[in-house]
Amino acid sequence: MYWDKKGYSFRNFPPGVLPGTDEITGRKLLYDKEDLTENRSLGRKKRDIPNVSSYCFNELHMFLRIKSCASHFKKSTFRGFTSTTYRLHEKTSNHEAETHFGFKSVPESMKETLVGQVFSNVASKYDVMNDAMSLGIHRLWKDHFIRAMAPGPGTKLLDVAGGTGDIAMRFLNYCKEIHGDNSAQVTLLDINPHMLNVGKKRFSMTPYEKTSQVTFEVGNAEDLSSIPSNSYDAYTISFGIRNCTRIDRVLDEAYRVLRPGGRFMCLEFGNVQNPAIAPLYKMYSFQIIPVIGQLVAADRDSYQYLVESIQQFPSQDRFAEMVKNAGFTVVGDGWENLTFGIAAIHSGFKL
């Protein structure tokens, strides 16, 4: 006995009619008995299918609906973001400019929400995962980043996408250890409150908590309208700019809030050019890092996005051009490669 979705029964398929298939699950559409549970509870009576033509019409209608639904859901690359992406996609205009979210294209208005979901998911394990993914090398990169900045006494720093506070902490420690300075100040700004809370917790266990040297602010790197122009000596953004929707706006805002003579510094993943290292690094990124994300943070999808976002970020020379186009003056190439170019430090001055 076979059953259709309306509760009709028949012993054999009508001549020339084959069962449909759900494109998402591969399951036959005609028709499991449990599909009738709701209809039976409503007292619907079973009877033989009336005729082949009405059956074919119903089958075609259902197939087209499922095909349309599947085309929407196949656009979502990651299982963890499927429902969010689909709901937001319904609200966006067909004419809206698109950007990338990992390897998929999304309307620009969606990316901030999707990236926010990623970092809300990973905030509590962010530092642990950085150690696991980089085998601790990220700590050496960040130490070198601060030494390259070489902040002087009384430097006022805006640390954007500062999240867990590891750059801000290194900055204050450097000023204290190198200059014996307790007047340096840092504003730790992040768009994600979950990440910012991790930074607050880190500073709460240090002597800096009871001083005015560190402040926290929720804010968007693309719109720093709450910050006056020409108000900071240095601007840092570490492993954050690639997650922004409009990088050009981030750079414009960085230029605006810096004082004349101020310095922009960015630590970000780069493009590995070494032909011996590049394929190994790519294999590690796509085959190993998402697995580590699943094992350590129980979140494979977020780390799949993160490695894809690295691939989408401009190469070192292209990003240096963007820095110059924002008005900054660069020295030499404008960047310094770290560990075969896996990461790079970019720098520019507002002159």
Image (cartoon, rainbow, N blue to C red):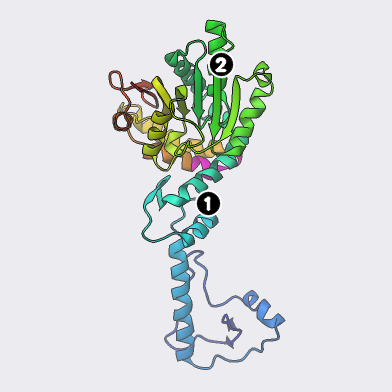
Chain part drawn in magenta: 296-304
Q: Which part of the image, by quadrant, shows the C terminus? A: top left
Q: Is residue 290 above or below residue 24?
A: above
**Above-or-below relation of 226 to 234:** below
Q: 132 or 87: nearer the eye?
A: 87
**In which quadrant of the rendered view does residue 332 lie?**
top left
Marks 1/2: CA distance? 37 Å
Label 1 packing within 10 angstroms: few (<14), some (14-19), many (20+): some
Who's the residue at 57% across and 80% down the image?
5
* Residue assigned mark 2: 172
User: Residue at 42% of width from left, 15% of height from top?
Assistant: 148
Q: Is residue 98 magenta?
A: no
Could you tell me which secondary element the residue under label 2 belongs to?
Answer: helix
Q: Amino acid at mark 1?
A: Phe
Looking at the picture, tell me which residue is in the foreground, 59 or 156: 156
Check residue 12 in the rendering and tell me which mark sits there, or answer none.
none
* Coordinates of residue 119 in the picture (x, y in percent): 55, 40
